Amino acid sequence: MLGNGVIGILSETCNKWERRTPLTPSHCARLLHSGGGDTATGVARIIVQPSTKRIYHDSQYEDVGCQVSDDLSQCGLVVGVKQPQLEMILPDRAYAFFSHTHKAQKENMPLLDKILNERVSLYDYELIVGDHGKRLLAFGKYAGRAGLIDFLHGLGQRYLSLGYSTPFLSLGASYMYPSLAAAKAAVISIGEEIATHGLPPGICPLVFIFTGSGNVSLGAQEIFKLLPHTFVEPSQLPELFGVGRDLNQPAQTSKRVFQVYGSVVTCQDMVEHRDATKVFDKADYYAHPEHYNPIFHEKVAPYASVIVNCMYWEERFPRLLSTKQIQDLMRKGCPLVGVSDITCDIGGSIEFVNQTTSIDSPFFRYDPLNDSYHHDMEGNGVICSAVDILPTEFAKEASQHFGDVLSQFVGCLASATDATNLPAHLRRACIAHGGALTCLYEYIPRMRNSDSEEISEDTANCHSYKKKYSILVSLSGHLFDQFLINEALDIIEAAGGSFHSVKCQVGQSVNVKSYSELEVGADDRVVLDQIIDSLTSIANPNETSGNQEKNKMSLKVGKVQESDIKKGHNTERKTAVLILGAGRVCQPAAELLASSGRFSSHQGYKACLEDDSEEQNDVQVIVGSLYLKDAEEIIEGIPNATAIQLDVMDHENLFKYVSQVEVVISLLPASCHIIVANACIELKKHLVTASYVDESMSMLNEKAKSAGVTILGEMGLDPGIDHMMAMKMINEAHVRKGIIRSFTSYCGGLPSPAAANNPLAYKFSWSPAGAIRSGRNPATYRSNGETLHIDGDSLYDSVVRFRIPDLPAFALECLPNRNSLVYGELYGIGHEASTIFRGTLRYEGFGEIMATLARIGFFDTEAHPILKDGKKPTFRTFLLELLKSEDVDGPLIAEKDISERIVTLGHCKEQGTAVKAAKTIIFLGFHEAGEIPASCQSAFDVTCLRMEERLAYSSTEQDMVLLHHEVEVDFPDGLSENHSATLLEFGRTKNGKMTTAMALTVGIPAGIGALLLLENKIKTRGVLRPIEPEIYEPALDRLEAYGFKLMEKIQ
């Protein structure tokens, strides 16, 4: 259902006054008919729920081609303004609305639970932020506009009850006007009356105080500026009344005043530092508000007629105006007539605004002297307005404004099956997808679970809170909208610490910072100090970093407390992984797993860490090999690792060790996997391999599912990373309704250019036998619609020159790699791609040399007569036998003799190729007089022996892995794109020891697969390959975090 291009528009049911719509009929028309239906916009149909109060009538939607129906079951994407009723949320759909859940707002957690239970993809408008850091979808200005107009309407009534007739009395409420323009015209009209006839002296100077500088405040000021006005600085307010005037005495003027006054106040007008010698510092104030005293009630409020409150406030800051302060002010004759709290911050910065009001009853009256509340305009006190749905009063303009922005990307949401393929600003706005919170919002359950009001006694006493050392840490900044809270919590957890949320105040707009107070704990004082150091580093980023102010976090640290918890009572669960094998690929996998806790603190790795439902501790690694010495060599220098001797044919021992772990990685020969897999299924343990999923493994699918076990195969390089990179490209193209016309994939394990120092320009980091056999396999592929078959004997002759434009220094060639058509079906492109090709990369010249050697007979596997009966001929004798030379006892043959003989025998036509083959034969030592071991029975055996001896890497030489995909995509609008993805990895030296690129690119993906299973990131059970987003998305993220360079390009 997701991504079907069908949009549903909700009928808003949360409030009788809600008449807005996220998309107007004109937006729908453009989406449906621009460029011919869904071709250009991604929208195929729009179904609108009927509504008799929506600002646009149902018939207007029908006129532009929308369907009107209560039933939205056919819709993959449902959009609204406010949240729908919980029982109306459909499963397995995408929803977009203002959810107010991303800050773990307690009142909206039932909504989030419903979203997760129904596997809904939730996009929150509030989180769609542009490159400038500001929200793209908001109604703030409309709230400000409607809020001030409504207050001016009430102000006229209030002044009348106080005995003054004012032009404001003729102004209606915002909803009474057919348009914003009409409402503005009415304000202009009363402005003209003020300019012509003035205001009564008894209410002048009429001063409006605006708090805040965001869209809400700007919208209110926009209306205010339609009146004849003058803005003054807060410091100039006393001058309007005469310096030192007694507030108990009315202003000494009998003249009417022909304008109103406005003043915009900021935090420096509201507070001052307790230390009189220090000037106001905004950053210091946000970090340490306890160092500041309120002054608004002394410096600003005494001169205010109207306070228009447009700012967000948190409990840790001084209030703008407390109940006691307003009581004192009114006793002194303060001219305050009313408060328009457009933020609707109940009991917040203005303490006596303790209730919301409604559009049809927008005011209450607070009498400070009697501390009483009334729902009329008569009597003493100040009138207060706190309506929480103001933008809907200008429903038409607000909807048009909102839809203008939403319509730019709603088609992208409607056609998306996978949130990770969306543009960054939309991807970041996806709170939940497929029944789980997305990576950026995994802090929500953390905040819920650690809420101090909800922690039970049992939870408070559990090990995650009972750490030996603890410290109180206060964080402030853009914790949630810039996701700094993720970094902070990841740092704590990655170091092995715990946290408990003591207090959390969340900013309600992109311009307002949030505050969180955490009790951070650790069993080791050094670890706790490291956590504080790491938190300090993100609180004080590099001064040269961009957008520094936006990404900055303030930090305040208390004193370290030591508990009386004794060592030895640690109840942390140790997770364990068993790695079977002792080849080169085992060590990178073991290192990754054993150091996962430490590595997870790396900056690039944090966003994709463990599932927060379970605290992930260090992983205990057990390496099992047939020979204990081999396993011990693997774990040398690796913490949390143990070596054991284990023969997988020993059923009892195999079950013993598999039962002790959560995940098994089998890096044994492929023929052994089935034995290990059956043991894992019986013991209900997950399994990861880097080998192809063959038929015997596929047949275990249902058994694995029934056991609740995941068997993740092909989690290496090729197969493995090649799958992941390919499926990412293919799925991204399909999301955009593209058709794959050509898919070509090339992969090779090669010497680095510096190590390609032999005639073949090739070396072996694994058995030459396997590499030679793979070069003799038949191949099948499709090219421009034609299926081509290559016999194994002709494979080397089919080699073609190959270049990668972004890597022009590499002179390469490629050989067809087995049956490419299998991948067409596996990747879901077999029916659409006219070209499907997978090739093996080698340096140029490799194919013609190997083809010549094959024709000579070096790769023949039949027993050779000269090697029978324990005979030990020399390599030279053997070479002359292959070259059919009669002069067996002649002088040592040279390169020239060999090349000429090759041409004479017809093994190659070109002299240049014969020379290259001869150089290779000489390099491999076939001309030498040494004896061939009796173990060699065939030419193939002798060649493998020589290649293993002469084409091995030295301890300091680097190998190289190069993986390159090219995908040609056609789109419905006629656009074609060429997509490419490249992985280039070299062997790495650490502590003087070289780890090959081949070992890294096979072992690391296997280790990542185990981690994903440990963290329950992979929830699907059965026999899997890494071709699903559930696997390849987090795996690719972690590969990049580990330092693999994955380059992508679109032309």
Image (tube, grey):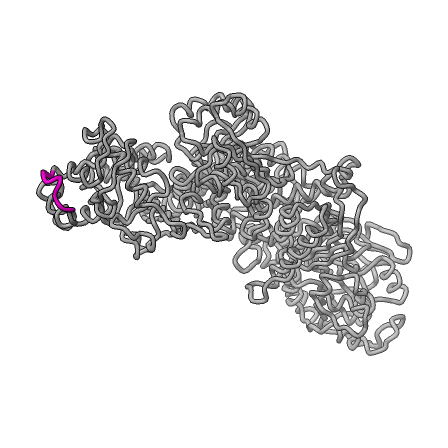
Picture mark count: 0
Picture quadrant where residue 514 is located: bottom right
Horizontal and vertical percent for residue 291? 79, 64
In screen coordinates, is 62 left or right of 333?
A: left
At which x and y percent is residue 204? 78, 71
Q: Position of residue 198 (x, y in %)?
A: 73, 72
Q: Over which residues does the magenta segment extend?
A: 885-892
Residue 512 is inside the magenta segment: no
Q: Is residue 408 visible in this depiction of the protein? A: no
Which secondary structure class fits the magenta region best? loop
Measuring 39% from the left and 41% from the top, which residue is drawn there?
Answer: 722
- 831 horizontally vs 389: left or right: left
Tell which of 962 and 23 is nearer to you. Answer: 962
Q: Residue 637: horizontal and vertical position, in percent?
A: 55, 45
Work out whether 368 lies above or below 983: below
Asked where in the image residue 835 lies, by quadrant, the reply is top left
- Residue at the spot 63% in from the left edge and 40% down from the top edge: 617
Q: Nearer the viewer, residue 316 or 674?
A: 674
Which residue is at 30% across, 56% downward?
808
Residue under the image location 75 percent in, 74 percent down: 235
Residue 196 seen in the figure: yes
Nearer to me, 435 or 761: 761
Q: Is residue 370 above or below residue 33?
A: below
